[in-house]
Amino acid sequence: GAVVSQHPSRVICKSGTSVKIECRSLDFQATTMFWYRQFPKQSLMLMATSNEGSKATYEQGVEKDKFLINHASLTLSTLTVTSAHPEDSSFYICSAREVVRDYNEQFFGPGTRLTVL
Amino acid sequence: QQPVQSPQAVILREGEDAVINCSSSKALYSVHWYRQKHGEAPIFLMILLKGGEQKGHDKISASFNEKKQQSSLYLTASQLSYSGTYFCGTRETSGSRLTFGEGTQLTVNP
């Protein structure tokens, strides 16, 4: 399957600081990438859909000014958590969509564990 | 709409079989199965698109019923490496987003 990388894998930051997470599709071009958030022992909750060259589409309840998404190229999307607070601590996972014939497969990055102190 | 997964958890001994179900109140475009180990990202297992379809590799297979509202994941002769949380993701149309079930935690003991 296709490979998606994510960086950093772990980050610890102080409350009030901003954190940037990168998501890259390594061997394919992804016009669409997705950002998920996962709390312990829970399912993946979609935060936003990132489209190359246009604004991201945010799910209901997700603050677009707090979670800034930029999809600058066909292989890179970034998520910036601004003014992070302890309640933002979570496992953030990106996913890239690869079009295969007439259907779409989604491949996930390894995730970023964010801890806000 | 979030699909319903069952059971929530299952504990097996190595070599035993398990079935995980994923159902929707609406006909689906596709069903995607993933396995996630603790602290890691989900790994893609397989996708089902056609009603009545069955597919699989090694000892893990899946089916999609004719009405395209239910899928089952079959794990036969389970191995220790099968332990993890299994998620089904569903799409209602070809362009819609993937929505995940709550997950099924599978534990395989020696």
Image: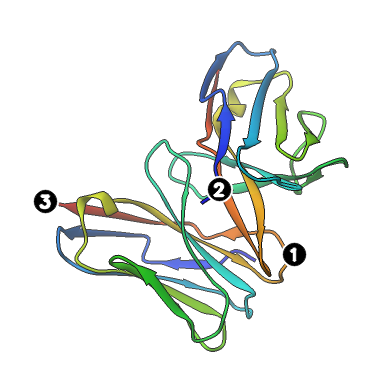
- Mark on residue A2? 2
The amino acid type, in three-letter code, at marker 1 is Gly
Q: Which residue is mark 3?
A: B110
Residue at (68% x, 70% y) in the render: A102
Question: Regarding mark 1 in the picture, which secondary structure is present there?
Answer: loop
Residue at (64% x, 35% y) in the render: A24
Q: Mark 1 vs mark 3: which is more N-terminal?
A: 1
Residue at (76% x, 40% y) in the render: A74
Q: Residue A86 lies in what quarter of the image?
A: top right
Neighbor class of circle 1 (other Cα within 10 Å; few <14, some 14-19, many 20+) is: few
Q: Residue B38 lies in what quarter of the image?
A: top left
The chain letter for the residue carrying disc 1 is B
Along the horizontal axis of the image, is A62 left or right of B14? right
- Marks 1 and 3 sit apart, C-alpha to C-alpha, by 42 Å
Q: Nearer the viewer, mark 1 or mark 3?
A: 1
The answer as to whether the residues below labels 1 and 3 share one chain is yes
The amino acid type, in three-letter code, at marker 2 is Ala
Residue at (14% x, 59% y) in the render: B13
